[in-house]
């Protein structure tokens, strides 16, 4: 189901009475099915719905796409080959090497990511932009078609940088460009103080994006999981893929019964698009 909106929470009540089409273009289908993807990432496709999600986000050939906080590269394995095949540009944010306080672990993480995606025959010329609480813009103003971030909003909130992230996304997007968000959804439960369980209220994301100048364009249930009760002992990280068995994921408790959490699967997630201007 897709809900189209013109602004704010009231728009979430507007329901379009037809089923959405998620027919991926041939290049996207090839990138999703491609041998360049890690088997452990392909194994998660049933929970992450890559072709459907990227089609909903409005991914198209020849776009400049910026992914904020790509993590281990689940989406990079798809977006970079897609950009290569369609004449587009894929940009990943990375640990800010200009930050003198950047940890060695973060530096090694960026180096490992760049090494993994350095094979231009597979991934094309992946570009990077420094990213952090003190980093500069995501790129030249009005230069990107699509900015996306997946399962990161709670982290930005915990780091007190959500407003900066959204302002920077707004600045780098072209007029009419799309901000695409996937995030663990607390609704109908209330959002906890400090989003301590990793679940964010849809209202929080919409309000923050509107504050940055965006307009809510559409929502999708493609990443919904009605089995997710959102009351897990270690927050969203109790569920796959984190599968914590102790607070903070510190160590492992062999006596913790994971059965019902593994049966739930990955989290229930909101999937939203916002537009710049218009």
Image: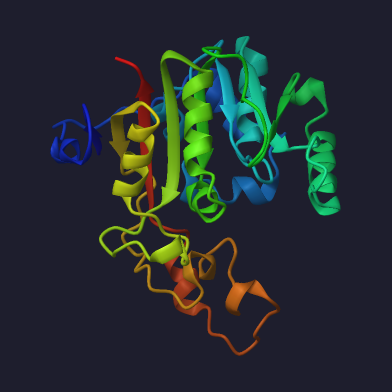
In this rendering, the answer to whether 100 lies above or below 51 is below
Q: Horizontally, is 165 left or right of 23 in the view?
A: right
Q: Quadrant of the C terminus?
A: top left
Q: Quadrant of the N terminus?
A: top left
Using the image as rendered, state which of residue 228 and residue 167 is in the foreground: 167
In this rendering, the answer to whether 198 lies above or below 41 is below
Which residue is depicted at the point 52% across and 71% down?
238
Which residue is depicted at the point 35% across and 34% down?
211
Which residue is depicted at the point 17% across and 30% down?
18
Instruction: Kindly indicate the quadrant of the structure image that contains residue 125.
Output: top right
Instruction: Kindly indicate the quadrant of the structure image that contains residue 84.
Output: top right
For residue 167, say whether it is visible.
yes
By what rule are the colours in the image chosen?
rainbow
Using the image as rendered, state which of residue 122 and residue 244 is in the foreground: 244
Which residue is depicted at the point 68% across and 47% down?
39
In this rendering, the answer to whether 88 lies above or below 137 is above
Q: Position of residue 25 (x, y in %)?
A: 48, 19
Q: Position of residue 246 (x, y in %)?
A: 60, 80
Q: Position of residue 200 (x, y in %)?
A: 39, 55
């Amino acid at each position: 189901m897709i809900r189209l909106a013109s602004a704010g929470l009231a728009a979430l009540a507007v329901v379009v009475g037809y089923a959405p089409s998620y027919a991926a273009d041939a290049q996207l289908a090839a990138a999703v099915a491609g041998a360049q993807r890690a088997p452990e990432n392909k194994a998660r496709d049933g929970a992450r719905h890559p072709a459907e999600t990227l089609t909903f986000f409005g991914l198209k050939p020849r776009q400049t796409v910026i992914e904020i906080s790509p993590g281990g590269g689940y989406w990079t394995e798809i977006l970079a080959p897609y950009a290569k095949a369609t004449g587009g540009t894929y940009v990943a944010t990375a640990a800010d090497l200009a930050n003198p306080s950047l940890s060695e672990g973060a530096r090694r993480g960026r180096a490992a990511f760049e090494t993994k995606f350095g094979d231009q025959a597979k991934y094309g010329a992946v570009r990077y932009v420094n990213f952090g609480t003190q980093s500069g813009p995501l790129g030249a103003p009005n230069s990107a078609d699509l900015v996306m971030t997946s399962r990161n909003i709670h982290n930005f909130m915990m780091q007190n940088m959500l407003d900066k992230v959204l302002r920077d996304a707004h600045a780098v997007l072209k007029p009419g460009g799309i901000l695409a968000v996937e995030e663990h959804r607390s609704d109908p439960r209330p959002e906890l103080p400090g989003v301590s369980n990793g679940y964010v209220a849809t209202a929080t994301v919409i309000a923050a994006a509107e504050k940055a100048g965006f307009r809510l364009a559409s929502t999708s249930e493609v990443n919904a999981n009605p089995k997710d009760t959102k009351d897990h002992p270690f927050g969203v990280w109790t569920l796959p893929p984190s599968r914590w068995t102790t607070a903070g994921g510190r160590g492992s408790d062999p006596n913790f019964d994971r059965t019902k959490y593994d049966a739930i699967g990955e989290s229930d997630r909101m999937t939203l698009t916002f537009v710049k201007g218009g």
